[in-house]
Amino acid sequence: MIRFESVEYVYPNGVKALDGIDLEIGDGEIVAIMGENGAGKTTLIKHLNGLLKPVRGRVLIDGVDTRNATVASLSKKVGIVFQNPDDMFFSESVWEEVAFALRNFGYGEEVVKRRVENAINFMDLAGYADKSPFTLSGGEKKRLALAIVLAWSPDIIALDEPTIGQDMLQKEKLLEVIKLLNSQGKTVIISSHDVEFIADLKPRIILMKRGRVIADGDAEEIFLNEELLKSCNLLPPQLITLSKELDFIGVKPRLYSSRELAVEIMTRLRR
Amino acid sequence: MAAILQGLQFYPGDSIIHRLDPRAKLLISTTFLLITLIYVEVTVTTIIVATEALLAAISGIMRRWIKTVYGSIPFIVAVFLMNYLIRMLIPGQLPTQMILYESFAAAYRLIALLASFSIFFLTTTPEEIGMTLTKLRIPYMYVFAFISAIRFTPILAEELQTIVDSQRSRGLELDRGNPLTRLRRYIPILVPLIVNVLRRSYELAEAMEVKCFGASKKRTYLRELKLRPKDLAVIVLALISIAASIYFKFISPIKIP
């Protein structure tokens, strides 16, 4: 359970990135944090494992105040996958790279071996175990970054802009992984402005603007509100726009999947 | 360490100092440097530091300037200790008090030195520094490399922070353990940093080649440096100060405490 209580954060250069955040995220939820660049999404995420501590207010992770805990201890529960994998690789092999965090957390070599193999296989990196992480392609690096965090199986996983630079196929795979993780009971938090990607997940959406939460609700409710989205420099998913255009044949605007919308159109046309 | 880097980075402002020709500013710093080297006496060093503080105040860079001084304290202490130890070990008959005074003076002069160049870097853009170096007939290729280094320092600092964040999120604890283990812990920080620097260098070089960098020997510039009356006044003042210092130190019989 994650709680933000009146959290404010000001960067050393004076920029106020979080201006009074009150939030509660329960176990096993999927939440998307959306908003334009500079809204405070990454700042919020960095508060989850104590990298940043609030200037005012507090952040509670399973009842623990982040100001009273080390980043290392919080990271055991909250795994953050940052945007740029190039900012974390330093090992001789992919295997060693994945093992790093596990060793930091004090797991025995037997456990380390098992978890590394599981994580590598889970993210389709089996053939790359002995390769240098620097020789991987962009997509493979992103998979490795995720494998690294999944290895220690934190209860809460936060992904900061996971779809940047990914092609459609990679995004589909990522969607599957997220759904799978959630079905295993993990809390997944995704910061993104990729509306189409988020629409597929139909998560709870927390919309941020200038350090504040301006909307918090379920995906359909938020994506149907075009004005709200525009104020955050976002556009609604294409299927919603299409369903709105089709109101002349009686289609109600909803967050349909493509199949649902096709069925709805056919039903309306038959009348 | 980061504090020193901040004190060497351009800080925008519209003061008299900012608007001076960079060559004049460079001469000011060099003047401070020369006087500090010529005189060992603490009184002179104090005058220098006070003058520097005055200039820093006028330029509105006081806080940053103080940060440089503050950040260089480890070096100052190291210089002090080294001086002290060396003077103690050399078989002379100087009293301990004299040795302490001289070591302190040496360390103090280092502050004056660092502080003087800090003012130059804080009030001069990398571009202006580049123009100055070009006027000194240094080939543009080297000038560009130098100012790129200055320009990328804040970016490097940001990247360092991002890397530290990523690795801490993987359980790396940098503030635990004895000094030896701590050093090893920095490998996950240094390797990504260096790899990124190298990658960026290649990308920058490619981008520059695409823009025809080095295509012709003769290069023109968007802005040209011109010396104006204020700049000339400053230059004359600086030269007079240098001449006066040399005179009073080596030629005149007047002793300075």
Image: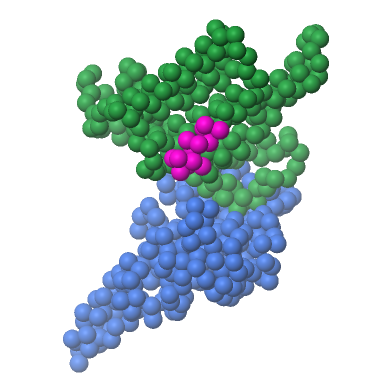
Chain colours: A blue, B green
In the image, A91: left or right of A223?
Answer: right
Q: Nearer the viewer, residue B101 or B204?
A: B101
Asked whether the viewer can see residue A251, the reply is: yes
Q: Residue at 65% across / 29% down in the picture? A: B76
Q: Nearer the viewer, residue B72 or B61?
A: B61
| Image height of A210 relative to A97, above or below | below
Q: Residue at 33% across / 68% down in the picture? A: A234
Quadrant that contains the C terminus of chain A: bottom left
Q: At which x and y percent is residue B89?
A: 79, 13
Task: Tell me where residue A268 sits by quadrant.
Answer: bottom left
Quadrant that contains the N terminus of chain A: bottom right
Q: Residue at 49% across / 29% down in the picture? A: B117
Asked whether the viewer can see residue A129, the reply is: no
**Residue A147 colored in magenta in the image:** no
Q: At which x and y percent is residue B100?
A: 75, 22
Q: Nearer the viewer, residue A270 or A232?
A: A232
Looking at this rendering, what residue extends furthest in the bottom direction?
A271
Q: At which x and y percent is residue B224?
A: 25, 28
**What main secondary structure does the magenta stretch of the protein show?**
helix
**Residue B56 colored in magenta in the image:** yes
The magenta-colored residue range is B50-62
| Image height of B62 relative to A186, above or below | above
In the image, B23: left or right of A41?
Answer: left
